[in-house]
Image (cartoon, rainbow, N blue to C red):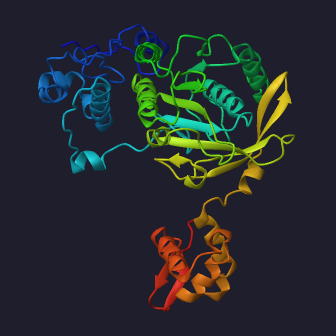
Amino acid sequence: MTIETCPFEYGSPEFDAWHLRGSRPTDRDWDAVVGVFRGDVYELASNYSFDDFLADTEQAEKVSALVESEKVKLLAREELASWQASRGELSPLTKISLGDLMNMPPVEWLVDGIFPASSLVMLAGTGGVGKSTLMVDLSVAVLTGGDFLGKPTQRGSVLYVAGEGLHGYGQRFKATAAHRGVDLRDGDELALVSAGVSMDNEKSMERLAADVAANGYSLVVFDTLSSLSSMDSENDNAQAAKVMNLARSVTAASPRTTAIVVHHANRASGTMRGASAFRDNADAVWVAFGTGNEQDKAFSLSSHASKGGKLRDGEARTIAGLSITEAHGAGVLDFDPAAAVTMKLESKSDRERAELEAHADEQPWQPGDIRRILAGVAENEAMNDRQLDGRRQKLAQQGVIEFRRDAGGWFLTPTAE
């Protein structure tokens, strides 16, 4: 068994140089490598299982700070299972004790509340809505540690895989940096892939995963899925699942790597185009949709299910106040936080709560009162009494309303300030 311990302080320039010097194995064949750790431990020999390693006191003492981290244990198990599955092997049965479950670390975010770290994200939108401009702005924010849509980011390096419009990206990045008032230098760890990536080709994605492992990118952008794959049909769930599994191998190649796959949306429905496996296999799905005329170039982002979105580890939301402006020779992103506040109400439950708040002076409510109030929400106009009672029960489950026995009726649940 080989263990390497970094002699330098974490986060120091010496640590970074040591960390990137090639110690991390790029051979992703799990017959030879059964675990990849962040920090001090890079390799476990195939004849030394992870559980045996933890049970070996002498070895454990060498990396005691790492071994005591529940996050590291889970990382090793998850990566092993992921790569065995990609090879068609049966993963071992893994059980998590109550102690491990209770000690699982909180979700980490690349962008607070929007894009989780170490995750696979889909960004969908119709052509021209602003997806690429949004991703360039995100890339500059991550590179410089700036805010994105009013939320803090984790600073890191970026790999941008461009499937189309390569020659315009240089000007886009320059214009976005100028619009943000920041300088981008050659050492800011941005790399743009202009060729050599096919998202449905195993060897191509293995090579890309190896590059991500060697460089430790925080963000990998695939722009767009249709230009970076040769799928026979986007509506084929088996093909879609394969593409998503290969994309996830990129996020597994390095700790904290988030991969965002840019895809198109149906013009009629506004939801993501193609098979349901794209959405099912993503950790988050954000849908961009226009909110003005073509001249305004205004749009919003939503992770609400009603828009075809998804946010597994956070609260679904809609972010408004986005628009594309021509500046510094290219289209750049503008964000107006004040406008974003005006679109807080997105889900049906939000609108129902707003309707109930308008009748708050009638509390306590009886079931018939709630049916009458909820029927005033546009989506509920055609509902019968039974369906409206179902909505009342749903709101109670969500904690929007509560029954108070002492008052003999229903009330809005107070919201935390």
Q: Is residue 313 visible?
A: yes
Residue at (68% x, 26% y) in the render: 136
Residue at (56% x, 88% y) in the render: 368
Q: Is residue 364 visible?
A: no
| Quadrant of the rendering where the C terminus is positioned | bottom right
Residue 234 image position (x, y, % from top left): 53, 33
Residue 282 located left or right of residue 34: right
Residue 159 image position (x, y, % from top left): 56, 19
**In this orientation, which residue lies closer to the viewer: 86 or 369?**
86
Residue 169 located left or right of residue 353: right
Relative vertical location of residue 227 with respect to residue 410 in this rendering, above or below: above
Please, which residue is most extreme toward the front here?
Answer: 232
Quarter of the rendering containing residue 155: top right
**In this orientation, which residue lies closer to the viewer: 196 or 148?**
196
Residue 359 image position (x, y, % from top left): 67, 82
**In this orientation, which residue lies closer to the viewer: 8 or 417?**
417
**In this orientation, which residue lies closer to the viewer: 110 or 374?**
374
Quarter of the rendering containing residue 112: top right
Relative vertical location of residue 94 with respect to residue 349 in this rendering, above or below: above
Relative vertical location of residue 302 with respect to residue 205 in this rendering, above or below: below
Residue 107 located left or right of residue 354: left
Residue 360 image position (x, y, % from top left): 65, 82
Residue at (64% x, 31% y) in the render: 138
Please, which residue is most extreme toward the right here?
Answer: 295
User: How many numbered marks, from 0 up?
Assistant: 0
| Quadrant of the rendering where the N terminus is positioned | top left
Quarter of the rendering containing residue 224: top right
